[in-house]
Amino acid sequence: MEDYDAIVLGAGGAGLMAAAVAGQRGRRVVVLDHADAPGKKILISGGGRCNFTNLHATADRYLSANPHFAKSALGRYTAQDFLALVERHGITWHEKTLGQLFCDGSARQIVELLLGECEAGGVAVRLGASLGAIEHADARFTVAHGGRTHRAPALVVATGGPSIPKLGATGVAYDIARRFGLKVVEPRPALVPLTLPGSEALFRALSGVATAVEARVGKTRFAESALFTHRGLSGPAILQVSSYWRRGEDVAIDFRPNAAPGWLVEAKRARPRATLAGALGLPARLAEVLAERLGLGELGAASDRALAEAERRLADWRFHPDGSEGFAKAEVTVGGISTVELSSKTMEARKVPGLYAIGEAVDVTGWLGGYNFQWAWASGYAAGQAV
């Protein structure tokens, strides 16, 4: 039996952050993970350069059954706080778009930063063995791992969600939560490509075509690029709305989000011999498909009323996804351990003193663009300060 002040389950961003903060407060901490290397999700993020935070990471950029839950942690550990840590480690960075910050070099630098912070706190990191039995008695948690039994008054669940199972992701966090009587909001894939049915095969045939759009689900809208794939729709705008999409709902696309009202009639006046496909200002293959669907050729041959109707449809083109590409392709998970069960200040379970849940394991899911890493850092910091 090995005794610690805190056991952290999961060597991802949130777990390593929590362990480092606690260790540097003088706590004796061990991190346990079944993976053979730490931070695997970090390493593949941002095309290998890790979109490590977002300058606009406020609670309104996160999905949760309680939209206010993330405010406390995000307010006490901000994007600027993590950026200061990045700079202290000599990591150079750049802002790409929309407040997204990336390493100039490799995502591995962020993993090394976290391991360096853990080392500074004397944290033990143990990898490459499955978690065994988890027990709780006499205000102590015991966890079997790799032939050893670890015991501590604090247990931090940072095992993430089931997205990207090829990296070893599982739903073990939910199993642990239920084992201790905590509610779980049904998890579903988020930031994930959507699939189209055979009736929309003409658009699937546009595989590889991308264009700037505004995508909408209900009242939620994102103006970024969309990408047609051999299975359906992807690209940043689609990934963003996928987190809000529910089976049976339409996804509406505005193919000309910045166009002024009446732009097609104006185009007809200026160039009556131009074709609709040529006037759209979109990638040629996409423009041809849209013009074919609208049944319009030369602008001069169309009535103003027909052009106004074409404008309306182009601004509100409805796709009917029949599903998503699932957890295998989802960047994150919507849902997870219910925030009703947790303190927003410490991330501790109200019903089970000493049990904490952080990161993607919790029902807090950020937008695309570094928001989920900032939640990992902020929730990890909150738990690390509390254990």
Image (cartoon, helix red, strand yellow):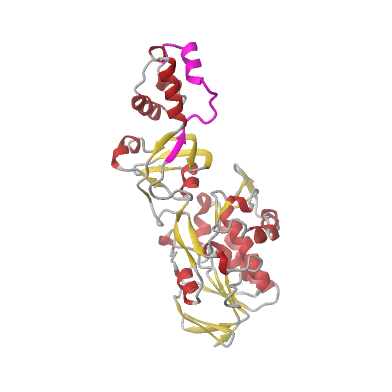
Q: Is residue 150 above or below residue 23?
A: below
Image quarter of residue 365:
bottom right
User: Which quarter shows the N terminus?
Assistant: bottom right
Q: Is residue 269 magenta?
A: yes
Q: How far across and how far down the image is residue 345, in percent?
A: 66, 66
Q: Is residue 16 magenta?
A: no
Image quarter of residue 355:
bottom right
Is residue 48 or residue 368 the one in the foreground? 368
Which portion, as a residue range, is magenta? 251-274
Q: Is residue 72 left or right of residue 335?
A: right
Is residue 98 or residue 122 the one in the foreground? 98
Q: Does residue 236 show up?
A: yes
Residue at 48%, 50% in the rendered image: 243
Residue at 70%, 76% in the rendered image: 26
Q: How far across and how far down the image is residue 56, in percent?
A: 64, 48
Q: Is residue 143 left or right of residue 81?
A: left
Is residue 320 or residue 142 the one in the foreground? 320
Q: How far across and how far down the image is residue 66, in percent?
A: 57, 59
User: Which quarter shows the C terminus?
Assistant: bottom right
Image quarter of residue 7:
bottom right
